[in-house]
Image (cartoon, rainbow, N blue to C red):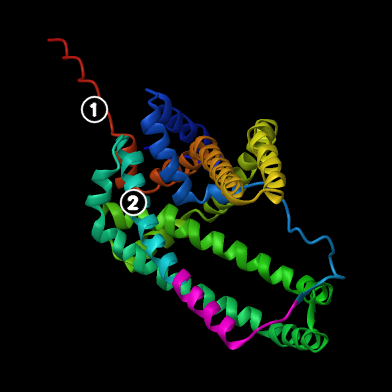
């Protein structure tokens, strides 16, 4: 496979995405792979737009009452532990699906099951690596954020003496914290790109350990620092630009699709206030049904429109790195046998 620059890899990645999702087009395959791609690439978070802000109308004049009794604290801790356990379980499923999607895109297979079963061991190794990296990243983040903790504690105690939190008092601390948060976010993106775009192919195709995959990636990065840097920049900019474009294109359809159920929800809610007995129960059930409908519409839009972007992102990574990783490149673009030379004249 030819070595392509970060900009040259864009067009082949889009072509692979078009061929994979639309040639031929089948709704079942389209929804299946778009859903997996959105889940593994995180595009659903980018496409959850305009859900409205907090109902609070004030920025600094209103407070939150402080009622932190021991029972509430225990409940919060229990919920936090449960969320961590569920998050780890979901993370494992996402890793397995990431390897399954990798196999499907590399081999242009319309089935997820082969990759799901084939890379079980590699996915577990990558999952453990992800946990270790996440723990290390959290430790670094804790060290970076530690100097700001005393300030927040001081403001919190002052607010506690007043009986409620004043959000405006936290604003100076938040402004000081913003650059640190931005640096940590960029570092997190860089770590994710290295893990998913570069190390994962080595671990999948060679059954490489984390150390072996990292060494192979580092060697290639050192040889082409500029190319990899440009790729990292585009890897951030392109999904962001695609999200903005989708938001602009979908804003009117979204208003129509969410507006009608939203108006119905408001009307039913208004009617519920004056209802009693069976009528009240019917109104509640209608509101639940309308809420589920709006959530379903949002998920369907995220999958149908965010899915192709997510698949294109993954193909972009494969095409760019495939030219620098021979084993991957040979699968993406098998070398064609050269035509036989014509016989020499006697």
Q: Nearer the viewer, residue 208 or 24?
A: 24
Residue 68, image quadrant = bottom right
The image shows residue 80 at horizontal and vertical percentages of: 51, 74
Query: Which portion, as a residue range, is magenta?
Result: 65-83
Q: Nearer the viewer, mark 1 or mark 2?
A: 2
N-terminal of the two: label 1 or label 2? 2
The reply to whether residue 8 is in sight is no
Residue 281 left/right relative to 252? left
Q: Quadrant of the N terminus?
A: top left
Please tell me whether residue 77 belongs to the stretch shown in magenta: yes
The image shows residue 312 at horizontal and vertical percentages of: 48, 38
Q: Residue at 21% of width from left, 19% of height from top? A: 341
**From the viewer's perspective, is residue 295 above or below residue 189?**
above
Q: Which residue is mark 2?
A: 99
Circle 2: is it few (<14), some (14-19), or many (20+) Cα within 10 Å?
many
Q: Which residue is mark 1?
A: 337
Q: Secondary structure at mark 1?
A: loop
Q: Quadrant of the C terminus?
A: top left
The reply to whether residue 289 is in sight is yes
Circle 1: is it few (<14), some (14-19), or many (20+) Cα within 10 Å?
few
Please tell me whether residue 340 belongs to the stretch shown in magenta: no
Number of the label disc, if any, that sits on residue 207? none
Q: Nearer the viewer, residue 73 or 328?
A: 73
Magenta stretch, overall SS: helix
The image shows residue 343 at horizontal and vertical percentages of: 16, 14
């Amino acid at each position: 496979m030819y070595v392509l620059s970060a900009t040259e890899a864009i067009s082949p990645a889009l072509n692979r995405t078009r061929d994979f999702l639309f040639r031929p087009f089948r709704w079942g395959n389209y929804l299946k792979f778009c859903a997996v791609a959105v889940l593994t690439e995180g595009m659903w978070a980018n496409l959850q737009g305009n859900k409205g802000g907090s109902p609070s109308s004030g920025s600094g004049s209103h407070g939150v009452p402080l009622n932190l009794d021991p029972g509430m604290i225990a409940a919060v801790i229990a919920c936090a532990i449960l969320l961590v356990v569920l998050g780890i379980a979901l993370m494992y499923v996402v890793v397995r699906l990431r390897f399954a999607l990798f196999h499907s895109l590399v081999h242009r297979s319309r089935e997820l099951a082969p990759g799901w079963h084939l890379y079980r061991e590699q996915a577990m190794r990558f999952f453990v690596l992800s946990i270790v990296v996440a723990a290390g990243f959290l430790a670094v983040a804790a060290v970076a954020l530690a100097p700001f903790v005393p300030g927040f504690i001081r403001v919190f105690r002052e607010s506690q003496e007043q009986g409620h939190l004043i959000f405006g008092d936290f604003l100076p601390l938040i402004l000081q914290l913003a650059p640190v948060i931005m640096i940590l976010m960029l570092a997190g993106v860089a770590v994710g790109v290295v893990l998913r775009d570069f190390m994962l192919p080595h671990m999948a195709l060679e059954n490489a350990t984390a150390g072996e995959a990292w060494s192979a990636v580092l060697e290639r990065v050192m040889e082409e620092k500029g190319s990899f840097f440009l790729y990292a920049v585009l890897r951030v900019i392109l999904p962001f630009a695609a999200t903005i474009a989708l938001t602009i294109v979908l804003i009117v359809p979204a208003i129509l699709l969410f507006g009608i159920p939203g108006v119905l929800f408001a009307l039913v809610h208004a009617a519920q206030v004056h209802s009693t007995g069976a009528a009240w129960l019917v109104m509640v059930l209608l509101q639940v049904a309308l809420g589920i409908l709006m959530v379903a519409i949002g998920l369907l839009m995220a999958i149908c429109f965010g899915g192709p972007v997510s698949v294109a992102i993954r193909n972009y990574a494969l095409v760019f790195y495939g030219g620098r990783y021979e084993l991957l490149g040979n699968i993406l673009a098998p070398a064609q046998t050269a035509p036989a030379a014509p016989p020499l004249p006697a």
